[in-house]
Amino acid sequence: MTAVVPTRELVDADLIELCVARDERAWDTLVERHAPLVYSVARRAGLDASAAEDVMQATFLALFNEAASMRDGQSVAKWLIVVARRQAIRERNRRERAGTPSEMVDHTEVAPSEPEATSVESWERRAAVREAVRTLGGRCRELLSLLFLDASEPDYDAVAAQLSMPRGSIGPTRARCLAKLLAHVREQCPSLLDELGATEVSGERPKGT
Amino acid sequence: MEPDVSNEALMKFELGELAESEIAAIRARLHEPDVATRLAHVRHLLHAMRDGRLDAPSAASVRRLKRIPRPDLFASLARALGQAADTLIATVAYDTRLHPAVAGMRGGASAAHVAYEADSLDAHIRISAEGQQRRMTGQVTRTSGEPCPGAVAIVRLDEPGASIQLISLDDAGMFTIDLEVGRYALAARCGERDLDIGDIEIS
C-alpha cells in the first residue's frame, strides 16, 4: 500500500505537477505557502493593502495559467517574486500616471519602497531560508515559524499555548532548532549563508517588517 | 585536543543565552577559522530569520486565490452552455465595495459595481438590492468594447447541489437575473470562449 504524503510536505515542483493535473489540494498548499511572500513583495513595492491583494490575485492567476510550462528545477518562489514585482511596479506606475485620488489609497498602509535593482535576489534568499525552515519538519518547523516567520508575531505565552510546550523550554528548544537549521543549510545550500552575509554587508536586504 | 564548539553553543552565544564562563570559552576559540566561519554563518542566518517575517494578506483574499482552479465547477457550467469552449479566468479589475471612491465616481453608492477582465473579454456586473432580493445586471464585452451576445450560466456556490441557471445575453451583451444573497460562480459564453468568474459575493 502506498502511503499518502500530505501536500504540505511536498516540494514546490511536486505541487506544480499536481496542479497541472488539477489537484486542488496541491493548489491550496501552494497558495498557503507563497501568498504571504507575493503579498509582501507587492507591499514593499509601495502598494497599499488593497492593491497588493490585486497583485497577488493576478500573480497567482498567472502561475495557474503558466504552471504547465514551468521547467523542471525552476524555482516557484523566484518565479512568483519576479512576476509579483513586475505586476506591482506596473500597478504603481499606472496609479501614478492616473493620479489616483488620494482617498483611494490608505497612505498609512503604504510600505516604504525598497531598492529595486537588488531586491529580487534578496527576496529569493529569504524565501530559501523559509523553505529551509519548512523542510526541517516537526516541532522545529512549528517553533521557528511562529517565532520568526509568523506575521502576527506571537509572544512566548502564545507560542507555548499553541505548541502545548512549557514556556521555559522555548528558549533552549529555539537554540537547538536554529542549530539544526544551520546544519541543514550548511549541508544543503552552503552558498546561501555567504550570500546572506554579502547582503548584510552591502545593506541591500529588504526592509524588515 | 579541545572539544568542538557546537553549532548550538554558537547559537546560544549569539542569542545571549550563555553564562559568563561559557562566553569566555567561546571567545577564546574565535581565532580558529572553523569556529569563526560557523559563528559568521550563525549571525547571517539569525539576521535573515529576524528579517524574514512577511506581511499577511487577508484571509478573504487567500480564500479567493484558492478558488482560482475550479475545473469541475466550470466544466459543468461550460456543459450547460453547450459545446466546449476555450476558457479565460477573470480577475477583478475593480470592485466598488473595496474602492468606495470608484463608487462615488460612478455615482451609485446604493449598488455595487464589479469589473472583471481577462485576455480578450471583460464583464461589468452591477448588484442592487430590491428588498430581500438582489438583482444582478451584467454586460459581457470583448476587450475592444464590442458587445458580445451569447449566454451566461450561473450557479450558487454556498448551496451544495444548487441547479445551474442559464440566461441569454441580449444584443448588447447584457443580462439581468434576480438572486438571493449568497456566493455565485458564473461563466459567460462569447463566441468560442468562456469567461469564468470564480466567486461573486452577493450580500
Image (spheres, helix red, strand yellow):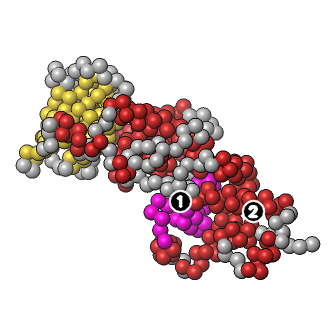
Q: Amino acid at mark 2?
A: Leu
Who's the residue at 72% across and 58% down the image?
Answer: B41
The disc numbered 2 marks a residue on which chain?
B
Q: Distance from label 2 to label 1 (Cα)?
A: 22 Å
Whether residue A138 appears in magenta in the rendering, the answer is: yes
Q: Is residue A161 left or right of residue B30?
A: left
The label number, if any, that marks residue A149 in the structure image: 1
What is the residue that sits farthest to the right in this orientation?
B1
**Residue B112, how many percent across, how many down?**
19, 42
Image disc number at residue B61: none
Picture mark count: 2
Position of B75 compared to A142: left or right?
A: left
Would you name the residue on which mark 2 appears? B39
Where A59 sits versus B83, above or below? below
Q: Residue B156 location in percent, x, y?
A: 23, 45
Residue under the point 20% across and 29% down: B139
Could you say where residue A181 lies in the image, as x and y percent from the top left? 67, 61
Mark 1: amino acid: Leu
For the point 64% across and 61% down, the residue is B46
Q: Can I make out residue A26 in this image? A: no
- Please provide the residue range marked out in magenta: A129-155
Decide if residue B103 is in sight here.
yes
